[in-house]
Amino acid sequence: MNKFLIILLLFIICQFQLTTFSWAKIRTYSLNKIEVTDGAGNVKLLPLLTDESKPMTMNLNIAGLGTNRVSAQCGIFSLALETQIFPMEKHNSDLLPRLDDATDKAKWFYVRHDQGVTLIELKGDDVKVHNLGLVPYTYVGKRQK
Amino acid sequence: MKIFITCILLFICFLFINVGNVWAEIRTYTLDHQEVIDKANVMKIDNLPILAGEKMDKRIYPELIIAGLGTNHITASCNDIYSLISGTSREIQIYPMDKNDGSGADVGDWYYVTYSQGVTIIQINGEIVKVHVLGKFPMTYVGKRNN
């Protein structure tokens, strides 16, 4: 009977450990700016506005960072439903040129959709959502504390 | 003897079939325009930036070469785009971006490669190619197929 109880306890502890490790942390970012690039390569940040020209903020939720199944949800076409996003691994970083010592510290994820590609660039507390294809834009935001 | 010759012939046929399968089609594109998005979020195709006060010479437009489309090892090489070159035209492997299930408009095949300062996306839509450079120096090059 005692042995049975010990095994049961070990099983419960094991389950608890598994649950703890598989817990997917959720990060929330506020997107409130839009990045505009002119032909000369100058980058400007403008406020994200509604159709009535009022400032607007959108929330981007990302869950599962650090696991092999990362998902994102945001009020834009490609991420309107909770969607799995795929990491873009740095396969060639050692082979490719480095213009200066600054290397890209960002983590990149992508999702394909019917109208193109959406890329999520995470760099510390900063986030950029690049939409390429039929409706290209770049939204910029910060992590909510 | 007949069996030996038949075997040799079969072996040559086998080699030929294999060579046929691994043959990588080479496509070349000239990137002579750029895509610009203005404040009103309107996209337009513009000429490449003017260098030293003069229009860019056609001879020095970046040329993008892509080989191996349809295989599982696709390579790209380009002169003049910093994300794809290292001073000389160097071949790099590019990776397909798989499409999720769904239907609707299709805006081409997408490939990516990461580099030390960001990500470069290659969008191939028929005869048109777009190279989206994201990261430190964002820019979108637009070009047409040459061959």
Image (cartoon, rainbow, N blue to C red):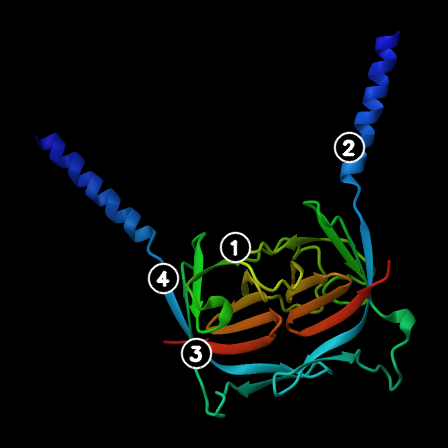
The residue lying toward the viewer, choosing from B24 and B81, is: B24
Q: Residue B101 bears which disc, if any?
A: 1
What's the distance in space between the residues labelled 4 and 2, CA to CA?
Answer: 48 Å
Q: Residue A25 bears which disc, if any?
A: 4
The residue lying toward the viewer, choosing from B22 and A18, is: B22
Which callout, 1 or 4, points to the residue nearer the camera? 1
Q: Residue A58 bears which disc, if any?
A: 3
Where residue B36 sits, quadrant-wise, is bottom right
Looking at the rendered structure, the kind of residue marked 3 is: Met
Q: Residues within 10 Å of mark 3 (few under 14, many from 20)?
A: some
Which callout, 4 or 3, points to the residue nearer the camera? 3
Labels 4 and 2 in the same subunit: no
x then y, percent, for residue B112: 65, 59
Image mark 4: chain? A
What's the distance in space between the residues labelled 4 and 3, CA to CA?
Answer: 20 Å
For image coordinates 50% across by 88% down, the residue present is: A51
Which callout, 2 or 1, points to the residue nearer the camera? 1
Labels 2 and 3 in the same subunit: no
What's the distance in space between the residues labelled 1 and 3, CA to CA?
Answer: 26 Å
Looking at the rendered structure, the kind of residue marked 2 is: Asn
Quadrant for the C terminus of chain B, please: bottom right
What's the distance in space between the residues labelled 2 and 3, CA to CA?
Answer: 53 Å
Labels 1 and 4 in the same subunit: no
